[in-house]
């Protein structure tokens, strides 16, 4: 994890931004800032308002209230990689023309951006003949080519199969990082956020519920709702507190202090995901093969997790809770 | 059936006779059709783009009007223009009634709805992300409109083809405003009507054949232009 370059100047600041779509308030009172050199991932479940917030920050939609300051030129690579029915190279040079890049510089810059995204060999291909992964590469190349001060990408890896996603993610990690640019990437998948970002912003139900470095958020989620979103799917009542766990925190151990019954077993690529019923809760773990079957009683050990007051954990909408490491 | 065959046989030599009257109305028809379509395109494309892409109050009403005007009876359009052009009318000072200019204006008015309504529909069918993305990349209005016209070119060319078809074939309006004056402001369509009214059926059929030939040539050219490098090619096979 890279440290946030706090000495770098703020390029984008949103203060108390609220955005409506029709009658619905999709983003509520969000404040955030992006600094030069930062790569921030905006993470949240479906319908959380991520794309709407991005549209507002990029100037595509007007916020209902709040203030957005941009110091430099901003662009967004929208989620749908819609390209004109021209060649790949023309698509990128068109973007440069729209951005105001002088004609003589366009072709070289377009080719450079395509090369950076591993798409130079596609330059002469008609955009209509590209595969989903190729379109995404060209789409990102187009946004990088214009060299904005603030770059925002809306789910750049959406709709790709695992292999293409992994390859594109690998290339994007280095390409999206720049000392002079602030980059905000909307991602749906937590793994993408870990791979990309210096800092995470978590948006749930239109509200900014957490922000910070990924490891820090994972170790100390600020509320049960954030913990749940970050994959703390197990819960165990312990007196006035509730312990939330992720599968790696729960380990089958014949000498373990906790007794549980396997209630469900879902085969995975490299093992089995087990649902374990306890007297005061339900935990999840991933066990190697051969794994116990549903109905079997096992013993286990819990190492890690986070504790919250039980009252806050029962209300998934609660935004407070003062989580502290458990185990 | 025999009558049609007889008239067709009589019509063919008239076409190849090199009749100066026929040649003059062929040129006038081409001139009227091209000028009317061009002027309708110059006026109608921006209006169609504004209706199709714009977000302003009254846009939907304009779209309804544009679509409704596709069904405007040419005779009514001609009557309205006639009332504008007569000496007592608001444009009477320009002496347009029964002139050649009146024919150009009438055909332009009839071609305009095709350009406006079909262009608006064509650009509305574009993926919205394409244009929003272009805007996010800094495209100004002119660049957005150029992109939209190019991307919707098959639909926009269909609008131009429909407008040209109207300008070549419509007869109701130009007969009223132009008077269908023999050898002066007749198009092929109005000349065919003139000859048919005079019971010169062979002449009417000859003019009709020339008009159909002209339509095929002009529309064929535009269709080739429209289909160049665009569209989806599906090969249909009988079910096994």
Image: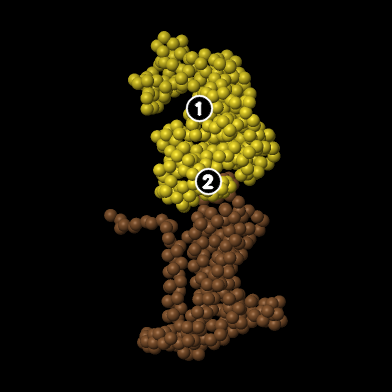
Q: Position of residue B8 (x, y in %)?
A: 39, 85
> Which chain is assigned brown?
B
Q: Earlier in the sequence, mark 2 or mark 1?
A: 2
Residue B134 in view of the camera: no
Q: Residue at x 53, y 22 (%)?
A: A215
Circle 1 is placed at which residue position?
A194
Single out the residue that lies furthest toward the left. Answer: B240
Label 2 – label 1 distance at C-alpha = 36 Å
- Asked whether the beta carbons under mark 2 and mark 1 sit within 8 Å of each other, the answer is no
Can you give x and y, in whole percent of width and height, for residue A270 in the image? 37, 25
The image shows residue B18, relative to residue A121, as above or below, that is below
Q: Residue at left 60%, top 78%?
A: B101
Q: Secondary structure at mark 2?
A: helix
Q: Are marks 2 and 1 on the same chain?
A: yes
Residue A110 vs residue A214, the one in the foreground: A110
Tell me the number on the disc at residue A64. Answer: none
Chain letter matching colour yellow: A
Q: Residue at x 54, y 82 (%)?
A: B186
Kindly tell me whether residue A304 is visible in this rendering.
yes
Q: Nearer the viewer, residue B51 or A263?
A: B51
């Amino acid at each position: 994890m890279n440290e946030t370059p706090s000495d770098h100047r703020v390029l984008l600041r949103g203060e108390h931004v609220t955005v409506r779509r029709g009658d619905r308030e999709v983003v509520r009172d969000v404040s955030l800032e992006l600094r030069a050199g930062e790569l921030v991932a905006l993470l949240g479940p479906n319908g959380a308002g991520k794309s709407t917030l991005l549209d507002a920050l990029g100037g595509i939609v007007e916020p209902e209230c709040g203030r957005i300051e941009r110091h430099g030129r901003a662009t967004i690579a929208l989620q749908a990689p819609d390209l004109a029915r021209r060649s790949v190279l023309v698509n990128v040079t068109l973007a440069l023309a729209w951005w105001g890049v002088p004609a003589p510089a366009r072709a070289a810059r377009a080719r450079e951006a395509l090369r950076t995204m591993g798409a130079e060999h596609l330059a002469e291909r008609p955009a209509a003949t590209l595969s989903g992964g190729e379109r995404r590469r060209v789409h990102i190349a187009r946004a990088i080519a214009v060299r904005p001060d603030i770059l925002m990408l809306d789910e750049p890896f959406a709709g790709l199969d695992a292999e293409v996603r992994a390859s594109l993610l690998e290339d994007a990690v280095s390409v999206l990082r720049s000392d002079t640019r602030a980059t905000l990437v909307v991602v749906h998948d937590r793994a993408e956020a870990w791979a990309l970002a210096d800092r995470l912003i978590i948006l749930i139900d239109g509200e900014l519920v957490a922000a910070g470095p990924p490891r820090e958020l994972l170790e100390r989620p600020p509320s049960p709702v954030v913990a749940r979103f970050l994959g703390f799917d197990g819960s165990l009542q312990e007196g006035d507190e509730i312990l939330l766990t992720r599968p790696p925190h729960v380990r089958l151990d014949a000498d373990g202090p906790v007794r549980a019954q396997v209630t469900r077993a879902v085969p995975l690529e490299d093992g089995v995901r087990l649902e374990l019923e306890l007297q005061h809760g339900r935990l999840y773990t991933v066990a190697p093969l051969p794994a116990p079957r549903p109905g079997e009683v096992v013993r286990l050990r819990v190492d890690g997790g986070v504790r919250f007051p039980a009252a806050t954990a029962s209300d998934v909408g609660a935004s407070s809770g003062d989580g502290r490491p458990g185990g | 059936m025999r009558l049609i065959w007889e008239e067709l046989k009589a019509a063919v030599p008239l076409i190849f006779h090199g009749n100066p009257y026929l040649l003059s109305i062929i040129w006038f028809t081409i001139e009227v059709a091209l000028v009317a379509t061009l002027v309708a395109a110059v006026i109608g494309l921006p209006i169609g783009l504004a209706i199709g892409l714009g977000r302003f109050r009254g846009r939907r009403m304009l779209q309804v009007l544009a679509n409704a005007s596709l069904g405007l009876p040419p005779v009514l359009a001609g009557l309205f223009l006639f009332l504008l052009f007569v000496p007592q009318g608001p444009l009477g000072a320009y002496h347009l009634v029964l002139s050649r200019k009146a024919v150009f204006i009438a055909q332009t008015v009839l071609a305009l709805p095709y350009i406006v309504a079909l262009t608006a529909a064509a650009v509305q069918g574009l993926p919205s992300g394409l244009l929003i993305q272009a805007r996010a990349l800094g495209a100004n209005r002119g660049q957005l409109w150029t992109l939209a016209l190019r991307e919707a070119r098959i639909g926009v060319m269909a609008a131009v083809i429909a407008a040209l078809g109207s300008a070549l074939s419509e007869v109701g309006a130009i007969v009223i405003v132009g008077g269908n004056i023999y050898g002066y402001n007749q198009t092929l369509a109005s000349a065919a009507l003139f000859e048919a009214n005079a019971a010169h059926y062979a002449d009417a059929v000859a003019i009709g054949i020339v008009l159909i030939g002209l339509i095929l040539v002009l529309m064929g050219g535009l269709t080739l232009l429209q289909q160049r490098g665009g569209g989806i090619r599906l090969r249909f096979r009988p079910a096994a």
